[in-house]
Image (cartoon, rainbow, N blue to C red):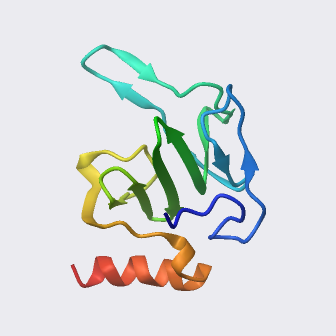
Amino acid sequence: MNIPTRICPICSKKLLMGDEDTAYDFYCKDFYLRYFVYDWHNMNLIIPNNVEFTGGKIKEPHYSVVVNNKVWTQSTIIPPYWIMSNSETKKSKIYHFPKEIQYPDDRWLLLEIPMLSPIDYVPENFARKIKNLVIFS
């Protein structure tokens, strides 16, 4: 499986390891700010366990990996794109945000492609690969 868990493939910093109280198993300390997710059906906010807030927004690592029941979910944010990859489906979904970052939702889904991992590219090339995929889709 080509999911980096030691070095951030975006900025080359050492990834931090989460514990049982952290929303992520592996994550970079660099982050973007995103809006909360609001569940209109149940009329409540959806906020992961023990996330950090600043200025009323959630700090979202620009790269993170979550392992749940042997399924790996990789999150990569390269504005204005957010790439979510899943080891179970072996797919990557590329989302585009018109203005500010919000949690990936089908409203912003641009592409679904075979699993793409940043480990296959140097950071600048990974960003270029995403932009090329979007342009030629």
The image quadrant where one finds the C terminus is bottom left
Residue located at (42% from left, 82% from top): 129
Q: Is residue 119 visible?
A: yes
Viewed as shown, does residue 61 lie left or right of 121? Answer: right
Above/below status of 71 relative to 113: above
Q: Position of residue 95 (x, y in %)?
A: 34, 59
Residue found 47% across the figure and 84% down from its top = 128
Q: Quadrant of residue 4?
A: bottom right
Q: How many marks overall?
A: 0
Residue located 54% across and 82% down the image: 121
State which quadrant residue 85 falls in: bottom left
Name the residue at 64% across, 31% down. 51
Residue 34 visible in the current orientation: no
The x and y percentages for residue 136 are 24, 85
Figure check: 128 above or below 101: below
Q: Nearer the viewer, residue 84 or 86?
A: 86
When the figure is inspected, residue 73 is found, relative to residue 110, above or below; the finding is above
Q: Is residue 77 left or right of residue 29?
A: left
Residue 73 lies, in percent from the top left, at 46, 49
Left/right placement of residue 68 relative to residue 43 reads: right
